[in-house]
Image (cartoon, rainbow, N blue to C red):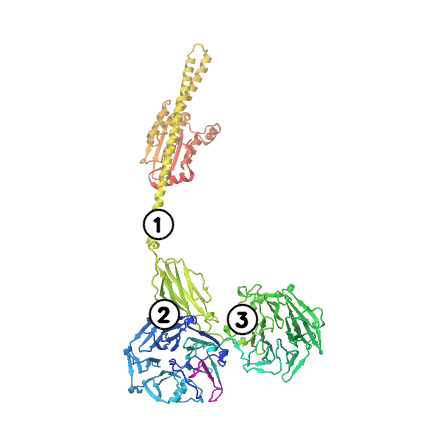
Amino acid sequence: MAGLCFAPVAMPAEPPHTVAPLSSQTPFRLQLDQLQHRAYLSRDGAPSSSTAIAQTPDGFLWFATPNGLYRFDGVRFDKSVTSLLPSTNIFSLYAEPNGDLWIGYTFGGASVLHEGTPSNIPVSDLPGGSVIGFVRTADKTLWLATTHGVAMQRGDRWETLGPSQGYPGHHPQWFGSIHGDIYLFDSDSAYVLDQHNHQFHSTDYGRAKHDLLGLPPDATWSKSHNPYWAGLRDPSGTLWFTREGQEGITRLRWGGASASPSSEEHFVQRDGLSGQFVLLYFMDRESNVWAATETGVDRFTVGKFTPVRFPNSMTNLTVAADAKGGVWVGSLREYALYLKGDEDPVRVADFGLGADCSTVDRQGTVWMPGRNDLESYDGSHVTHVAPPPGTLADEHGEQVLQACQGIAQDGAGDLWVSIAKVGVFRRSRGTWTLNGGLKALPEGPAIRVLGDASGRIWLTYPGSRIALVEQDSVKLYSITDGLNVGNVLALDVRGTHVWATGDIGVAYLSPSGTFISLVGKGGNSFRDMSGVVETRTGELWLNGPDGVYRVSAGELAKWFRQSGYTPAYELFSQADGIRGVPLPIRPGPSMAQSSDGRIWVATKQNLSWVDPAHIRRNTIAPDVAINSLTAAKSTWPAASVPPLPPTMHGVHIAYTAPVMSMPERAHFRYRLKEVDGDWQDDGGRREVFYANMQPGSYHFEVVALNEDGVPSRQAAKLNFTITPAFYQTSWFKGLMACVVALALSLLYMLRLRFIERRYQLLMEERLAERERIARDLHDTLLQGMQGMLLQVEMLSNSRELSDAQRQRVTRIEEKMRGVLIEGRDAISSLRQAQSGHANLMAKLEAIGNDATIRSSTHYSVRVEGESLPLRPEVCEETIAIVRESVINAFKHAKAEWVLVSVYYTPRAFIANVTDNGIGITEQKIQQQQSDGHWGVAGMRERAAKLGGRLSIRGADSRGTTVELSLSRHAAYAIPSSIKRRWLQRRLSGGYSNPH
């Protein structure tokens, strides 16, 4: 023990043995070279020459250095908080349970970091010198020590202690807690604090040093050894420390009650250490040990798989399990080793040198090929067996057994062996027979030979072929039986369950006798698996170049039940303690299970194991933190994000979670509630981008999961708002809506005016055409008929005619005169329609005047109600209907009087023609139509065109009433809304051709 000493760098305030103890699944009994090691250097952003390490309750590691404060989340070292501190030269750290971090400076003064914001204690408020440690006592009082004295916090001020509190005022060198008591060390004295009366009492210096290091009770320690510097006692009792004058890490382990260490080991720069000298040690809450050097930081972790420490280097390993919980390991250049539990490997001299296949038979004898024969070992003797004929090859003048690809024993005690380039042999009663004398077996060597619990022999071949030998009966499986795995590299038989692996997949032999291919989540077909084991609990383990796959019993059971189901799986890699990559063919298989349940995984030069029932799991829930939000080329801390500008095109949110053991396997689930429909899994990324963001309020959440799927206790949340631009505000949108509505209204009015103008032109064209027709009729037809009538009159007065002839001419004259009158009436009607805007009453009077010229029937017009302007087409069609009714009354009714009545009411416009003539019936109207008289039908069509109703009914005592009734919307032209609806009807239905 006299050689132990410590490098002069301050230890953390809390002694290492106060960290939470490791579980029984974290065997720090392992040697240093069995731990997983990772070095962080300056290229990784790691600090150098750290003076203190602390871990806050949120899981972040903090490193104090002479050039700033670093925060570490397992992936990234962040130094940004240094810019907020009054000094970059930091000497000590202390993490409070509430998350605050106390920072002590080398040149005096201190700060407390609360939620990312520091509050500073001036140098003048504290004893001078470097702040070497902080402690909070049971009564919640905070104490600190500097190299010049001790102070305690009273409210908002600090009180420096002196001899009156029991401390003589020397130069403190270490200050902290040991087993719940507060100790103060100087160069040659130790003091313990009475936490009730705040008094220091001198204590035994040697005993205090012993407790500070956490040494076993009987371990001795020289007084000359400085106890304040780099050291750590882990929960297994192993001491990590730095020996003076010796580089790297030294680990001491005590066995039993011995005062002297039972073992000593070293880890130096050539082993991968980041620097020459370790300045301090720290154990985090996940039981990782951290060592800070002058050039970086190192992490030591217990992996899920435990590497085996061989006495000498071994290569090309073959593994065979026995019935006692142990395994036999053969190697290309070493004698066979026997491993059992946590015991050291035992070498069997003169057995198994150069072995490339192995098996343990039913009697417990292990078989391995030797240099030029087959060898067996029964626990006491090595037996040599001559190899099959033709299996020796010349190698530099020596006859050497060619490579063995598999060896097994069947139920009859016969030995089966496959020799590369030659074939399969069976040894029965001391005689070797090619293919066991079974012609049904394929020619050539088998890739694997396996004997199952029933004594059957399984042989695997290239090209998806397996042969099953049972009492000289051979059953062949091939691709026709669903076996589509390529070259069959491994086989596992447990009861009725048979698994085969190959270079293109994995298959299971179903009870129906056909193989079913296994495909995992994401379409993983598990290619190139050279080892397979199904455990007693129903888990499936596979070994391949990517690592070791584990399919849980529950997932496998779902796969058995549900056709097409793709089971989830867990992948273990070199980060879990598996060192190297398995050899695909020889030796093989690359995986075995011992009777104690352990899974053994062989690679080219290494062997490791895992107990499926006790896989080391990280149960620490990671605390996720949102670091910042970036938008529009500006970045804000998550705690103070202002309303974001409207011109930004997207946001970038950075977040993290402190996962120290395997940060590369931590993954995150996030969602932006207003954008994402569900939680998104981003794998290991620690940032997310959203583009094309619209103004509004947003709510972001993120959850972290560690390497074993343990999620954060609660999600980290970030709420932010994107302010709208003026053109995105509600008032602007409302204004734009009004402008658009006004523009549409103007366009609509312009359209209405265009249509109205078009209608006026159509009406003018129509009236002009009627005028032309009337003029043509007057100038041609009527004038011609008038001339003919004059000639007929002259003929009727001729004396040359007889009375009978004159009578006939007179009837013709009267007939022509009547036709002439009717033609004049028609022309009059055409010409009167040309004044569509004339007064309705004047038109009705004109109709009466024309009708009474040749009749004694009395005609009158009556108006009731205040007259309102009618639509032009209503006026025109009403006149046409009234004219037709009046003409019919004068011609056919033999009436004494005809009355035209016009009613202007708020709800309707009514015009009727009443006479006291002989009356008319509907039957008579139908008869006249059949005779070619369509006057009434025309009136009804005109009424329907206006959207009104025409009725013909008998009067009170005798006569007829013809009545036209129109709603106010169809008749009147006063409100613009009525005009618009009328035009809309015209737009939808169009205008009839006036011709």
| Image quarter of residue 87 | bottom left
Distance (Cα) linking label 3 and label 1: 64 Å
Q: Nearer the viewer, mark 2 or mark 1?
A: 2
| Image quarter of residue 648 | bottom left
What is the magenta range?
A: 240-263
Is 338 in front, or is 555?
Answer: 338
Give the residue pinned by disc 1: 737
Q: Earlier in the sequence, mark 3 or mark 1?
A: 3
In this rendering, the answer to whether 199 lies above or below 813 is below
Kind of element beneath mark 2: helix
Q: Earlier in the sequence, mark 2 or mark 3?
A: 2
Residue contact between numbered discs 3 and 1, judged by CB atoms under 8 Å: no
Give the residue pinned by disc 2: 80
Q: Report crowding for label 2: few under 14, some 14 to 19, many 20 or more residues within 10 A (C-alpha).
A: few
Distance (Cα) linking label 2 and label 3: 38 Å
Magenta segment's dominant SS is: loop
